[in-house]
Image (tube, rainbow, N blue to C red):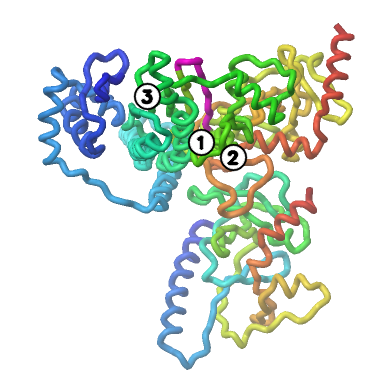
Amino acid sequence: MSDEAIDARDIDLAALGTDRAVKGKDDVVVKATSQYISFRVGEEEYGVDIMLVREIKGWVGVTSLPNTPKYMRGVLNLRGIIVPIFDLRCRFGMDRTEATNLHVVVIVQVGERTMGILVDAVSDILTVTEDDINSVPDIDQRQDGEYLNGLLTVDERMVGLLNLNALFNLDAIASGAQMAG
Amino acid sequence: MIDEDGKGVYAEEGVDYGIFVDLTANPDEIYAATEAVVTPAAQAESEVQPATAAVSAKVAAPEAGAAPAKQKSTHIKATSIRVDLDRVDKLVNMVGELVITQSMLAQHMTSIDLAKNQQIMNGFEELSMHTRELQENVMAIRMQPVSSVFARMRRLVRDLAPKLEKKVKLITRGEETEVDKTVIEELVDPLTHMIRNSMDHGLETPAEREANGKPAEGTVKLSAEHRGGRIIIEIADDGRGINRPKVLQKAKEKGIIDANANLTDEEIDQLIFAPGFSTADQVSDVSGRGVGMDVVRQNITSLGGRITVTSVPGKGTTTSLLLPLTLAVLDGMIVEVGSENYVVPINNILETVRPQPKDVHKLMSGARVMKVRGQYIRLVSLAKIFKVNDAVSDPCKGLVVLAETDTGQPVGLIVDKLIGQRQVVMKSLESNYSSIDGISAATILGNGKVCLIIDVEGISTTEKKMTGDVTMRDMERVIEGDHAAE
C-alpha cells in the first residue's frame, strides 16, 4: 500500500468516525451501529473496533526483543513512543508472517497501552448493527471464543471480530514467554 | 566559601568577585536579586549557562552591588507557569523526532550533489542550528534549581536540633544548581536521611565539642555543583567522623562481615551501607532502626548515581552523591552483538578488553571466567542471553566489556564490537509492553531505530539462572590449574 493510500484512509476514518457520532445522537430509533476495520491475515478476515485504531502504517523493520513469545515481533518507534508489534498470523498458531513493506501494521489502543498488529492487508471499513454480529459457536478450542467477540458476515465473507484485550493480554504474553524460554 | 556570619558568598572557584546575599532571606528574593545583577554581566559574557550566570555575575563592589539589585528586584515579577509534565514530555518527544528526521535528511543530502544550489545548503545549515537550539531549550524546561530541596533541609535541621539537644548550623551552597525535576523529587528522602545521620551520629553534643576544642555549634554543609554533566551533592559535617572500631565491632556482631576479617579504613567506612547495619545503641525516632544508609544507597543507584563517604576521625564525615542531571538521558556505549545493537550504560562500564585465549577458562558449570590482572571475572554472553544467532561467541575474537554490578562484582559482557558513545533518551518498555529480563529500557537512535538498554544487574542474575552460580570451589579449581600451568 502506498503512502497516499494510507493517507486517504486516515481521512476516511476521521470522517466516518464523526459521522457515526452524529448519527448516534440524532437518530435514536435507528439501532446503534458500530464500525470495524477489517484486515486480511492469509485467507481469513478479522476486524477491530474502529475507535480502537489509532493509525495504519506500512511495515518497517522492528527491533526484536529477547526472550519474548514468537508472535511478539519487536518494538518500533512511533513518533518517540516505543510500540510493541504483534504478528497476528503467528498469534493464531501459524508461522511468522514473512513481512515485506507491503504488509500493514494497525496501531491500536488497548486500555492504556498502544500496540501494533501486523496483518497482510487492510481491506474494508464495515458499518454494522448489533444484530449483524453473530456469537461465536461453542467449539472445543476455547481460544476461539475467548479471542473473538463475534462473527460478522459481509458479502458471504466471514469476519472475526477480535477481542484485543484477550489476545494481547500481558499475563498471557508473560506465560507465553515462559513457554518460549 | 562561607564566612563566619553565616552569610553565603557566591563565587566561582578562582574568580574573585561574587554577590553577597543573606542566605536566610527568601529564596525568591535571592533569585530575583541575582537575576537582576546578571543582566549587565550576561552581555559581557554571552556564553554563560543560566545556572552559573547567577553566581559569576560581575559586580565591582560586591556588597554595594547587591543592595541596589535588591531594590530593583521589586520591579521584576517572577514569570512562570505550571505546565503538566506530560505535555513537556510530549514536547521533548516531538523535538527528539525532529532531530532524528533532520539527521536523516542530512544523510540523504550528502548523497545528492547540492554544491550548485548553495541556498538549499545554507538553509539546511540554519535549520540544523535551530533544531539543536530548540532541543537544548526544550531539555532545559524540565530543569529546576535544587533550592526547593535545600530549603526543606533547613527546616529539618531547625526542627531536629533541639530534639537531639545539639546546636547545628546548616550552610548551603550552590542552591541554584539545576537538575531535572524527577531527580529533585527523588533527592528528598536520601538527603533527609543523610542529614539526620550527620546530626545524630556525626555531630557531638555541645559539651563534647567544647572539650575537643571545637565550637559548640556544629556545622553541616550541604552543597551542590555541576561537574562533567552530572551533579555532585555533598553533605559534610564537622563532627566526630565514623567511629571505625565501633562500626567494625557492630558489623562483626551482626554477622555482616567475618569475625576475622581484616579491613582497610575505607572498607570499614563502606560498611555503613550494609543492609541492617546500625551503630546506634538505642532505637530512637531519629536513628537506630537499621534501615538507613543501605536504602539511601539503593535509592541513589536506582537513579543511576553513586554515593561515597569519606571520614576523618575527630574532623568529620563527608558524603558525596554523584547524580545524573536527568533521569531521562543516559550516557551509553552502543555495542554490537551479531545483527543487534545494545546500549550499555557508561556508568556500569569499567573497561573494555580483548582477552588472550590463555586468560579465558571454562568452569564445571559451563560458565566461563576471564583473568584480568589477577582477578577472575565471570563472562556473560549477551548473544546467549538474548538469543542472537550470528554473534561472536569466542571472547578472544570479540571484545569483553567489564561492567560493574551493584554487588561490586564485575561481570564481563561478550560483545562483537563497540559502535560508539552516545547520550540516549530512556524510554520505558513497560508503558506499552512489559519488562524484559536484562533490559532496563529502550531508546531511539539517530536513525530512528529502537535500541535496547542493557540492565547489567539483571543480565548478571539472568545469566546465573541460565548457567548456575559460579561457586567458590569452581573458582579455586581454575586458580589452581592456572598456577600449575605457570
Q: Chain of mark 2?
A: B
Would you say residue B308 sits in the magenta stretch?
A: yes
Q: Which residue is mark 3?
A: B219
Residue type, numbered disc 3: Thr
Q: Which residue is mark 1?
A: B424
Disc 1 to disc 3, C-alpha distance:
40 Å
- Report which quarter residue B182 is drawn in: top left
* B321 on left or right of B363: left
- Which residue in the structure is indicated by mark 2? B451
Location of the N terminus of chain B by quadrant is: top left
- Marks 2/1 same chain: yes
Q: Tell me where residue B205 appears, x and y as whole percent.
A: 42, 25
Residue B323 in sight: no
Percent from the top left, x then y, of residue B195?
44, 32
Taking depth in this image into account, of B195 and B101 the one nearest to the observer is B195
- Identify the chain of the residue marked 1, using the numbered disc in the image: B
Q: Residue at x 42, y 23 (%)?
A: B237
Residue B35 figure quarter: top left
Q: Mark 2 near mark 1, Cβ–Cβ under 8 Å?
A: yes
